[in-house]
Amino acid sequence: MGHQKTPVDLKKPVPFTTSISGGIFPGKMIFISGVPNPDAKRITINLRCAPKVESNIALTFDIRLQWYGESNVVVRNSMRNGWWMLEERHTPYFPFMPNANFDMIIMAEQHQFKIAVNNQYLLGFRHRVQPLNRINTLQITGDVGLTQVRFQ
C-alpha cells in the first residue's frame, strides 16, 4: 500500500494573516479561494503595510453579503496614516454567495490592482499607497472558510 499525501490544512483558520515575501510589485498575483459560510454577513480582505499595520491599508476589499442593511456590495477603500479615503462601491456584478466556492485573483499592475473572481474580471482599484513594495501583509477576516491562499 502506498502512502497517501494528505493536505496539512485544507481550511485555513480565519482571521488569517500572512506576510507577502518581497512585498507587492507589478505582476504580483494573489490567489484566494474560499467558501462563504452558510450565514455569511461580511468578508474582508486587506493588503496592509507593516509594521504599522493599523495606519496604512493599500486595499480593503470588503464583501458585504448582509451587513447592517446592506447586501451584495463590495466596498473598496484605502487607509493612509490612520485616515480612510474615499470608498468605491460600484461593481458590474456580485460574485459571492453563501456556501458557493469562489476563486479570486488580485493582480498588481503599474497603476492599479485588477481583481477577477471565478475567471471573470470584476474591477480595478487605483493605487493610493506607494511605493507598492511597502505592502507586505495579507489579512482575511470574516465569515469564510479559506481553501487556498497563494502568491505568484
Image: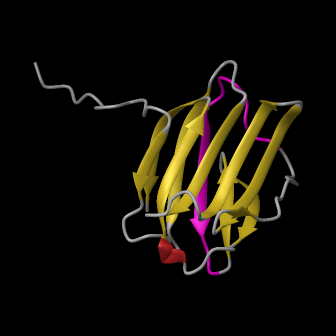
Q: Nearer the viewer, residue 84 or 15?
A: 84
Q: Quadrant of the C terminus?
A: bottom left
Q: Position of residue 96 (x, y in %)?
A: 73, 36
- Residue 108 lies in quadrant: bottom right
Q: In this view, does 45 lie to the left or right of 128?
A: left
Relative to 62, does residue 7 appear above or below in the rendering?
Answer: above
Q: Can residue 25 be seen?
A: no
- Residue 109 lies in quadrant: bottom right
Q: Nearer the viewer, residue 58 or 94?
A: 58
Q: Residue at position x 72%, y 42% from top?
A: 63
Q: Residue at position x 50%, y 37% from top?
A: 15
Q: Where is residue 6 in the image (x, y as percent from the top left)?
A: 26, 28
Q: Does the magenta-highlighted stretch encompass residue 78?
A: no
Q: Where is residue 101 in the image (x, y as percent from the top left)?
A: 61, 32
Q: Does the magenta-highlighted stretch encompass residue 102?
A: yes
What kind of colouring is applied to the model shown? Answer: secondary structure
Question: Magenta residues?
Answer: 94-110
Q: Residue at position x 30%, y 31% from top?
A: 7
Relative to 9, does residue 118 appear above or below in the rendering?
Answer: below
Q: In this view, does 10 lie to the left or right of 15?
A: left
Relative to 77, does residue 126 appear above or below in the rendering?
Answer: below
Q: Residue at position x 64%, y 43% from top?
A: 44
Q: What is the total number of numbered labels drawn onto the structure image? A: 0
